[in-house]
Amino acid sequence: MFETVIGLEVHVQLNTKTKLFCSCPTSFAEHQNSNTCPTCLALPGALPVVNKEAAVKAMRLGYALNANVVHASNFDRKSYFYPDSPSAYQITQLTNAIVQNGELFIDLEDGTQKRIGITQAHLEADAGKNIHESNYSKVDLNRAGTPLLEIVSEPEMRSSAEAVAYLKKLHSTVRYLDISDANMQEGSFRCDVNVSIRPKGQKEFGIRVEIKNINSFRFVEMAIAYEVQRQIEAYEDGVYEQEIFQETRLFNVDEGVTKSMRGKEEAADYRYFPDPDLRPLVVTQEMIDEAKEMPELPDVKVKRYIDELKIKRYDALVLCSEKELAYFFETMLETGATPKTSVNWLTTELLGRLKKTEFDITNSPVSATKLGELVSKIDDGTISGKGAKEILDVLMEKDADISELIDSMGLAQVSDDGAILEIIDKILEANQDKVEEFKAGKEKLFGFFVGQTMKASKGSANPQKVNELLRERLS
Ligand code: ADP
Ligand code: MG
Ligand code: ZN
């Protein structure tokens, strides 16, 4: 039996207005090489100046992860030669990063949480982009110098499910903190997966393989599954030492396999050394105060939903997994809708309908206030759940006044005691034999009376009211 060991390195592109060491804008769609200056072009004599906004955003994540936010961190040069890096080195933080020793609690399938240690989160500058034409290549440096935050975990995950849970929690957290749009398709949240195996019970770690730049949760799962299988087979065939070595691999999406990209560089290959152009990044009290301004984070939110709103743990986790969903839900509650009905109408009815359209929760054609209003009408018995579904279908197509829809579609429920009693009395009158049988103990007949009353009201009577009043009359 083997145990899987996984450690993750996640690159998050910070959503700052300007680059990490110069005042060029970070906007993307500009003309090639127009968002550049002597600093990000690495012209001789140009000096880097640290972007305070990037530092504050890194610190904010640090506080959210219960980490040590370092008050004087350092920048180092990592040397490598690529055409998309004009300086031939990347400015990063190797030994004394701005964020150190944090933790993230991941949510497991069985409803429990597991603590994953965060080694560090460091600031670094992104490279530019190579564009390959048929027989030549071009370099676009608009992205060069964009701030990245690399978040490094301890090797504490033991399955691909735990790795995915970690990524989802981190993704959700950086989005709550509003430090990155974390768009995976566009590469603003990408991850390197380190995988090894060891026989159960063995203390030492096995040989680690790094799979670079995976940009979807599903691919992370597939890449780990393939890699674990490959390593176990090598072990069982007695060729572990020969076939598994520390290297960098790439996940081939079409074939579902990982392939060797290059041998893993040692730290020495990068000739790291302290960047002589940059003084230590010293944080001020003002920066600390700004970094600590943060919204309610998912763990606290989930707990509050469970304890105060009496929502089931599973539902609370779903609602809090994305800030847009949680805020939508909270806006619904502001209209007076009850939590219980709101959960169902948001997660089942609205999300179910959105799935069939090109919209999602961020641009839903039915606003949170509107859905809250509809739910309130169910809560107070004005309409039935069935009627509300018809109204929601209409609202998905075009906005309209809910009260007017109730009128024009004839969906108002009769909740008025007098009106319902009138029907009940007629039914009981016409079925006196059954009333006797019921009173003699034939409990089953209760359903019959409910059915008859609903039928006589043409479905407009509030079923809950019908139940209550019938019980009264028959007791
Ligand atoms: P490097 O600097 O070469 O990338 P690090 O020591 O920074 O190496 O580790 C990078 C990542 O690899 C970390 O997320 C760490 O948790 C993970 N890691 C280290 N050893 C192992 C291992 N044996 N198996 C799986 N992951 C590992
Ligand atoms: Mg590393
Ligand atoms: Zn610049």
Image (spheres, helix red, strand yellow):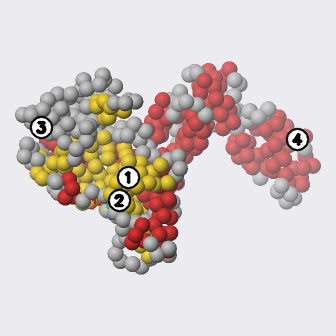
From the viewer's perspective, tell me whether residue 244 is left or right of residue 468. left
Label 1 near ligand 1 (CB < 8 Å): no
Q: What is the number of the mark on residue 415?
A: none
Q: Amino acid at mark 3?
A: Pro
Q: What is the number of the mark on residue 261?
A: 1
Position of residue 126 measured from the top left corner of the image (x, y, whole percent): 26, 40
Q: Evaluate whether residue 362 shows in this view.
A: yes
Give the image quarter of residue 204. bottom left
Tell me what residue is drawn at x 31 percent, y 58 percent: 264
Earlier-in-chain disc, 3 versus 1:
3
Determine contact: label 4, label 3, CB under 8 Å: no
For marks 3 and 1, give the CA distance.
32 Å
Q: What is the number of the mark on residue 48?
A: 3
From the viewer's perspective, tell me whether residue 159 is left or right of residue 28. right
- Sort mark 2 into few (<14), some (14-19) or many (20+) by Cα contacts within 10 Å: some
Determine contact: label 2, label 1, CB under 8 Å: yes
Q: What is the number of the mark on residue 247?
A: 2
Q: Nearer the viewer, mark 1 or mark 4?
A: 1
Tell me what residue is drawn at x 52 percent, y 38 percent: 337
Q: Which residue is mark 4?
A: 429
Earlier-in-chain disc, 2 versus 3:
3
For marks 2 and 1, give the CA distance.
8 Å
**From the viewer's perspective, is residue 261 above or below residue 39?**
below
Q: Tag 3's secondary structure?
A: loop
Determine contact: label 1, label 4, CB under 8 Å: no
